[in-house]
Image (tube, rainbow, N blue to C red):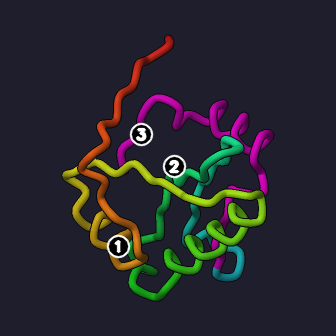
Amino acid sequence: MILRPGDDLDSIRLKLQRDADLFLVAREGSVVVGCVMGGWDARRGWIYHLAVKPSHQRRGIARALILELELRLAGKGAKRVNAQIYQSNTASLQFFSACGYEVRPDLVMIGKALR
């Protein structure tokens, strides 16, 4: 796992204050085995992070988290959901492809650090 700017505890707390209903956690008993962080900008839904504990992968947990997030985003009015995935993250690219997501070669992600 790679932590990037915005992945610190204070940023996660702020995200929970804004979109608590889009931060989903999968548990096995009291153990967290997966989570997904979604966002809604009043136009589109976004998937920011998806993770499943390696010992629990390939059990449908990630797919269940994504399906529930999609339902919640659709309930807010989202007609589309996007995710940003590093090209080197082939496992995530394959997973999202299997979930019906398509690579958009016509788009270029740009960004700027504000701090």
Image height check: is 110 above or below 87? Answer: above
**Considering depth in this image, is 114 or 4 the residue closer to the camera?**
114
Image height check: is 17 above or below 100? Answer: above
Quick one: label 2 or label 1, which is nearer the N terminus? 2
Q: Mark 3, mark 1: which one is toward the viewer?
A: 1
Report which quarter residue 95 is drawn in.
bottom left
Other-residue count near label 1 (Cα within 10 Å), few / some / many at <14 / 14–19 / ≥20: few
As drawn, is 60 to the left or to the right of 90?
A: right
Determine the residue positioned at 72% across, 38% down. 13
Q: Secondary structure at mark 2?
A: strand
Percent x, y of residue 19? 75, 47
Image height check: is 81 above or below 63? Answer: above
**Considering depth in this image, is 69 or 106 the residue closer to the camera?**
106
**Considering depth in this image, is 11 or 97 the residue closer to the camera?**
97
Q: Which residues, given as a range, are shown in magenta?
A: 1-27
Q: Which residue is mark 1?
A: 95
Percent x, y of residue 103? 29, 58
